[in-house]
């Protein structure tokens, strides 16, 4: 047929050692690069991808693909500029100096809407937490250029913020606008390794602060009116 359809082979380069004396697997194609149509060709379309394949003891298997949009996929048909699937780990290393993984946001610097996110996904598609760098101020010339870090975890495959570090270095747990070095919305528990009961601290809204033991054998309650109850 003279028609080129989606998935058709356009051209291929094979790499092999056909005169290798040991024969068998040694003379098979060891690697290949081929061009593959990604859509049916027409007078206005010749969408083509490049497929890179390598082999070990068999014919080459696809390992990486560059699609018509320039997206690179390793182990997957890519939907992003770099898309890696079924990788045991991702490593950045250098022989000298300090390795850097740089996540860059180049959106308009004159507003505070820009973020840069390190996102974790479970089961290929489900939300599994993320770390977000967000702007406390805009990044235009002469502006404050301040940012915060937001830490999210997932419940029912939906991410929600659990902790934030502001540009001032204040840490908020369940508090997205901490005004102190450590601000916690909720109770605090202190564990012990000595075989005794642990302790807890509980802030009670519009009432005061309560400190006690796990077995409730004793506690101190500091009321908002400065009265102290020991029980």
Image: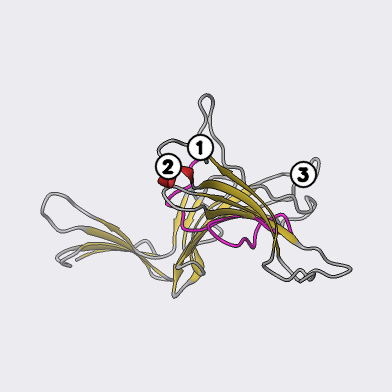
Q: Is residue 79 magenta?
A: yes
Which is nearer the N-term, disc 1 or disc 3?
1
Mark 1: which secondary structure?
loop
What is the number of the mark on residue 23? 2
Instruction: Determine the residue located farthest toward the top in the rendered image.
Output: 96
Separation (CA) of disc 1 from disc 2: 8 Å
Q: Quadrant of the N terminus?
A: bottom right
- Element under label 2? loop
Coordinates of residue 118 in the picture (x, y in percent): 55, 54
Q: Assign the C terminus to one quadrant of the image.
A: bottom left
Q: Are marks 1 and 2 in contact (CB under 8 Å)?
A: no
Judging depth in this view, the residue of 41 and 68 nearest the camera is: 41
- Name the residue that disc number 1 marks: 19
Task: Residue at 44% x, 52% y: name it.
Answer: 58
Q: Residue pushed farthest right?
A: 43
What span is in magenta? 66-91
- Closest to the observer, 82 or 97: 82
Predominant SS of the magenta segment = loop
Classify 120 as above or below 171: below
Q: Is residue 102 left or right of residue 2?
A: left
Residue 168 pos. (x, y %): 58, 45
First in sequence: mark 3 vs mark 2: 2
Label 3, residues with CA under 10 Å away: few <14, some 14-19, many ≥20: few
Could you tell whether 36 is left or right of 32 in the image? Answer: right
Q: Is residue 18 above or below residue 118?
A: above
The residue positioned 73% from the left and 71% from the top of the image is: 5
Count of numbered tags: 3
Magenta stretch: includes residue 36: no
Q: Residue 173: which quarter of the image?
A: bottom left
């Amino acid at each position: 047929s003279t028609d080129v359809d989606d998935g058709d082979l356009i051209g291929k380069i094979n790499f092999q050692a056909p005169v290798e004396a040991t024969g068998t697997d040694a003379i098979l194609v060891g690697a290949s690069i081929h061009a593959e149509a990604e859509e049916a060709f027409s007078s206005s379309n010749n969408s083509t991808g490049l497929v890179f394949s390598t082999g070990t003891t068999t014919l080459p298997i696809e390992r990486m693909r560059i699609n018509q949009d320039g997206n690179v996929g390793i182990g997957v048909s890519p939907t992003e500029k770099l898309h890696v699937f079924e990788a045991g780990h991702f490593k950045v290393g250098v022989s000298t100096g300090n390795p850097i993984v740089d996540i860059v946001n180049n959106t308009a610097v004159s507003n505070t809407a820009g973020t840069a996110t390190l996102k974790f996904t479970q089961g290929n598609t489900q939300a599994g937490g993320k770390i977000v760098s967000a702007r406390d101020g805009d990044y235009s010339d002469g502006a404050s250029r301040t940012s915060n870090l937001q830490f999210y975890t997932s419940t029912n495959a939906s991410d929600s913020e659990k902790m934030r570090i502001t540009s001032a270095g204040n840490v908020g747990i369940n508090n997205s606008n901490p005004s102190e070095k450590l601000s916690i919305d909720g109770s605090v528990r202190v564990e012990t390794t000595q075989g005794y009961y642990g302790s807890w601290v509980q802030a009670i809204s519009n009432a005061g602060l309560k400190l006690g033991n796990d077995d409730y054998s004793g506690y101190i309650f500091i009321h908002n009116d400065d009265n102290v109850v020991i029980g």
